[in-house]
Image (spheres, helix red, strand yellow):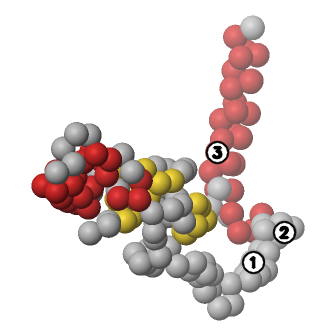
Amino acid sequence: MASEKGCKEIPMVMYEARQEPSAPEYCSQGGGYEYPAPPPYSYRETATVEQPVYLVSQPPIIVAGIFSSRPTSTICPSCRQHITTQVTYRLGKLSYLLCTSLCMVGCCFGCCFVPLFVRIFKDADHYCPYCQFHIYRYKRL
Ligand SMILES: [Zn+2]
């Protein structure tokens, strides 16, 4: 038994001994290799794969001047969608001015508060219906 072990160990040592000198001969083994492939063909001849810039910078949208007290179709500066503005009426200077004027004239029995409830005397806030962005405030005065 012991002799068999010794016999087995000997070829292993021999094998390792042979392996060591063969290791440096790396190039000689590559004779039949298909390793030396031609250099990979590169499609990057110009190497300019620049992505077209689609104007990420937001140009200013001029919205002033086109608004009235009514819903207006425009482009939302925030979400940049084509929208029809949502108008919210709020009390403006004209409402208070008319109210004060009516009061001074003598309509102090409720008539003076009429301008506070009439839309055409109020300012109009234009909002985007999608993002609720306040686009413009139309002022009577
Ligand atoms: Zn919007």
Q: Which residue is mark 1?
A: 40
**In the figure, is residue 106 to the left or right of 36?**
left
Which tag is nearer the camera, tag 2 or tag 1? 1
| Residue 54, numbered circle | none
* Name of the residue lying farthest toward the left: 104
Q: Is residue 115 above or below residue 9?
A: below
**In the figure, is residue 49 to the left or right of 133?**
right
Dot 2 lies on which element?
loop
Dot 1 lies on which element?
loop
- Which residue is pictured at 69% across the width and 63% down the height? 26
- Which residue is pictured at 39% across the width and 51% down the height? 118
| 27 vs 112, nearest the viewer | 112
| 8 vs 119, nearest the viewer | 119
Is residue 60 among what the camera can see?
no
Residue 82 x/y as whole percent:
61, 65
**Residues under labels 3 and 2: Cα distance?**
28 Å
Amino acid found under the numbered disc labelled 2: Glu
Crowdedness of circle 1 by 10 Å Cα count: few (<14), some, many (20+)? few
Amino acid found under the numbered disc labelled 3: Ala
Is residue 88 among what the camera can see?
yes
Which tag is nearer the camera, tag 3 or tag 2? 2
Q: Which residue is mark 2?
A: 34
Q: Quadrant of the N terminus?
A: top right
Do tag 2 and tag 1 residues touch (Cβ < 8 Å)? Answer: no
Q: Is residue 37 above or below residue 104?
A: below
Which tag is nearer the camera, tag 3 or tag 1? 1
* Name of the residue lying farthest toward the bottom: 46
Q: Which residue is mark 3?
A: 17
Crowdedness of circle 3 by 10 Å Cα count: few (<14), some, many (20+)? few
**Residues under labels 2 and 1: Cα distance?**
14 Å
- Which residue is pictured at 68% across the width and 48% down the height? 19
